[in-house]
Image (tube, rainbow, N blue to C red):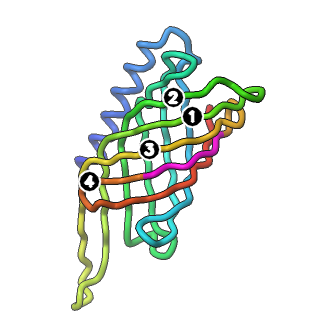
Amino acid sequence: MKKLTLFTFLGLVFLTSSAQNASSTPNDITYGVDVKFGTIATCGAYGVGFHMERSYHPYISWDLVSVSWEAPFDSPADLDRMSLRTGVRGFSPCFFRSMRGYAHVDMGYTAIVAKCLDEDFNMVHEDFHGFGLEVGVGLRLTDHIGLGYAFDWDSETKYKGHYFHFSYLF
């Protein structure tokens, strides 16, 4: 877990410093905080996330980094799902004031940490690590508020999740 934390921190520092040097105007980089509600396998789940995107064109941006954490409603202490991803985001033209649609594909690293008791009531930890993919569509209602849906998958457990995102962008 220490290696994962260090890897995540170094990746964020590297991507942040590179993005700020590559951009000529500060408006090219957008930060977003997401709150998610959906499913992990067959049970309800919630999550939080952070993403940073750099615009290259009015209709195309690169999700420099997308970090998220999810847990089931019924036992949030027993399962943690964490993701570190990067990807591309495409936008539609504005169709009502500043409202516009978007679609995104993010790929990267996903870790699932499951904690449970065995038959002798000893704590057992199971870790799954692998490739993760998120594909989503949504609507930017204003320059600061977004709503969307995302399908989430990972290669190790073949997990499939469905989430509704509420985003605040700054």
Q: Whole-Å distance between the Cαs marked 2 and 3?
A: 12 Å
Q: Whole-Å distance between the Cαs marked 1 and 4?
A: 25 Å
Give above or below for 19 relative to 36: above
Counting residues from the start of the chain, the first of labels 4 and 2 encountered is 2
Look at mark 4 in the image and give the residue it sits on.
Answer: 155
Q: Whole-Å distance between the Cαs marked 3 and 1?
A: 11 Å
Look at mark 1 in the image and give the residue it sits on.
Answer: 102
Write down the region rendered in magenta. 146-151
Tell me which amino acid carries mark 3.
Answer: Val
Q: Whole-Å distance between the Cαs marked 4 and 2?
A: 25 Å
Tell me which amino acid carries mark 1.
Answer: Tyr
In the rendered image, residue 166, in percent from the top left (x then y), is placed at 62, 48
In the rendered image, residue 102, in percent from the top left (x then y), is placed at 57, 34
Tell me which amino acid carries mark 4.
Answer: Ser
Secondary element at tag 4: loop
Q: Quadrant of residue 86?
A: top left
Question: Looking at the image, do the residues carrying marks 3 and 1 touch, with CB atoms under 8 Å apart?
Answer: no
The tally of labels here is 4
Q: Residues within 10 Å of mark 2 (few under 14, many from 20)?
A: some
In the rendered image, residue 123, in percent from the top left (x then y), is placed at 26, 79
Look at mark 2 in the image and give the residue it sits on.
Answer: 90
Counting residues from the start of the chain, the first of labels 3 and 4 encountered is 3
Look at mark 3 in the image and give the residue it sits on.
Answer: 135
